[in-house]
Image (tube, helix red, strand yellow):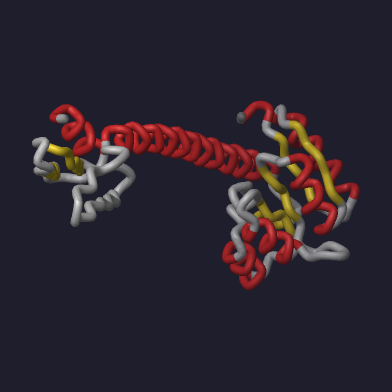
Amino acid sequence: MDQRAKILIVDDEPFNIDCLEQELQYLGYDSVSAANGRAALKRVEVEAPDLILLDIVMPEMYGFEVLSRLKANERTRGIPVIVISVLDDMGSVVECIERGAEEYLPKPFEPVLLHARIHASLERKRLRDQEQLYLRGLERELEIGRQIQAEFLPSGLPQPPGWEIAAFIQAAREVAGDFYDAFTLTQDGEIGLVVGDVSDKGVGAALYMLSLI
């Protein structure tokens, strides 16, 4: 992702946008821009940038509100935001960090420091994206495991006269090492009940139980 990352520049001053575009072009990144906070939120929805360089003092919507809306939205909260602003007082810096900004740089920015912050933010995002991809893959595998385990449980239970037999199983984790069955033993209607429980939880317990069925 790092070499072709798309970065959104949000600033109401064309000169600032031009300077940042040149820096990003030098680093080999793609860039798009927005001149105010409301336009920035719309561009985020359309462009899905990998990183946002955000000014604070802008018309229509301040960067503080942009930050809050980005981090409140599940689809955009993972996009790293580097604030670049003339506001260099401690209160403004703290507010930006509390609202979810990853980094804060004062204007005029130091190019070398900007490059380092961009690289670090994109690398953190790359690692988070890999982690989320792995977790989604793991969840799919666990769902397949749940389906396979369910197929080993009886689809129906015998109902001898005068009796009602029912069963309920709920795994403490995604899958479990539990098993049950009920079946007719004799023509006289004798019923056999089987309950199995491996002393553990999770995938290991489930695999061990399946090997014994």
Q: Residue at x 44, y 35 (%)?
A: 140
Image quadrant in which the N terminus is located: top right
Residue 81, x across and y down, in percent: 65, 51
- From the viewer's perspective, is 197 left or right of 168? left
Q: Residue at x 83, y 44 (%)?
A: 33
Q: Residue at x 73, y 53 (%)?
A: 54
- From the viewer's perspective, is 119 left or right of 202? right
Total labels: the figure holds 0
- From the viewer's perspective, is 178 left or right of 56? left
- For residue 172, say whether it is visible: no
Q: Residue at x 9, y 36 (%)?
A: 186
User: Residue pushed farthest bottom?
Assistant: 91
Quadrant of residue 63 in the image?
Answer: bottom right
Residue 179, x across and y down, in percent: 20, 41
Residue 25, x across and y down, in percent: 77, 31
- Which is nearer the eye, 15 or 61? 61
Image quadrant in which the C terminus is located: top left
Quadrant of residue 57 in the image?
Answer: bottom right
